[in-house]
Image (cartoon, helix red, strand yellow):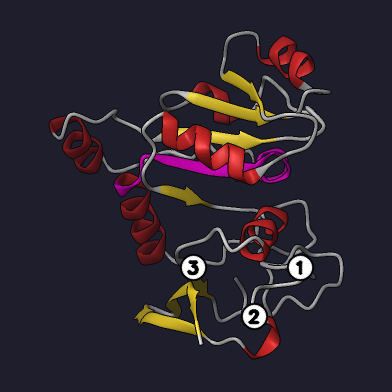
């Protein structure tokens, strides 16, 4: 995020907040995970492939008896997804979580490009995580966007936060922020445990344990 807490600016092009060294760190974290999750809005806006780019890291996963790529996961309430997005056509298996009212729409749109699961009439993050666990996902990386970050943090479901703070200021009211308004556990005085602070070029990585609040 930027110093003032934004994930992007309001322009049509994606704002690159990280530097090459931090992008490589993200690739390393991806390779360590069983699944990577982004929201449908982030998918539509950024159109990411969401891959492990390092051949060496992919080879290591295969040598460990894992899939070459982590499972790619998205969530959508509306079912407004396009089958043309890069997400569906690169990497390994894909999984979509949706609600009862949109499940047939998503299955029709994707037509075999992903496994589609409904968690009921409303999106229930507990059921999403339970289903991922049932499928063997022990380590999940959530890459955004801000609405999903806010929901998971408000429900106290995140074990770690990795903040890469870039030396940029966005300052645009309609740009997406890392977190939105919510009733966060413990309120405004609950201090999270700091696990790591590290400079990566001109970016600062901060790792917090949000469940360890004092």
Residue 172, magenta (yes or no): no
Mark 2 = which residue? 186
First reached walking from the N terminus: tag 2 or tag 1? 1
Q: Do the residues labelled 2 and 3 touch (CB within 8 Å)?
A: no
Residue 29's x, y, as percent? 35, 54
- Residue 145, above or below 182: above
Label 1, residues with CA under 10 Å away: few <14, some 14-19, many ≥20:
some
Task: Please state which of residues 139 and 121 is positioned toward the viewer in this rendering.
Answer: 121
- Distance from Cα at disc 2 to Cα at disc 3: 17 Å
Quadrant in the rendering for residue 2: bottom right
- Residue 201, above or below 96: below
Mark 3 = which residue? 161
Task: Please state which of residues 113 and 184 is positioned toward the viewer in this rendering.
Answer: 184
Residue 44, magenta (yes or no): yes
> Residue at the location (73% across, 43% down)?
41
**Left or right: 170 as drawn, with respect to 92:** right
Q: Is mark 3 on a helix, strand or loop?
A: strand
- Distance from Cα at disc 1 to Cα at disc 3: 15 Å
Give the magenta part as a residue range: 32-46
Q: Are marks 2 and 1 in contact (CB under 8 Å)?
A: no
First reached walking from the N terminus: tag 1 or tag 3? 3
């Amino acid at each position: 995020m930027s110093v003032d807490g934004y994930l992007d600016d309001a322009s049509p092009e994606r704002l690159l907040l990280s530097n090459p060294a931090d992008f490589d760190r993200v690739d390393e974290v991806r390779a360590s995970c069983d699944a990577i999750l982004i929201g449908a809005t982030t998918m539509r806006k950024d159109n990411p492939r969401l891959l492990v780019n390092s051949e060496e890291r992919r080879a290591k996963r295969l040598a460990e008896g894992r899939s070459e790529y982590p499972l790619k996961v998205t969530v959508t309430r509306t079912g407004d997804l396009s089958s043309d997005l890069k997400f569906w056509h690169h990497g390994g298996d894909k999984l979509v979580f949706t609600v009862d009212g949109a499940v047939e729409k998503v299955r029709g749109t994707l037509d075999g490009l992903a496994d589609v699961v409904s968690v009921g009439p409303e999106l229930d993050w507990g059921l999403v995580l339970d289903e991922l666990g049932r499928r063997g996902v022990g380590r999940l990386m959530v890459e955004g966007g801000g609405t999903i970050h806010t929901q998971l943090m408000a429900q106290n479901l995140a074990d770690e936060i990795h903040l890469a703070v870039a030396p940029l200021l966005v300052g645009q009211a309609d740009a997406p922020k890392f977190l939105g308004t919510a009733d966060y556990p413990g309120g405004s005085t609950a201090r999270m445990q700091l696990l790591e602070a590290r400079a990566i070029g001109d970016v600062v990585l901060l790792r917090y344990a949000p469940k360890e609040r004092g």
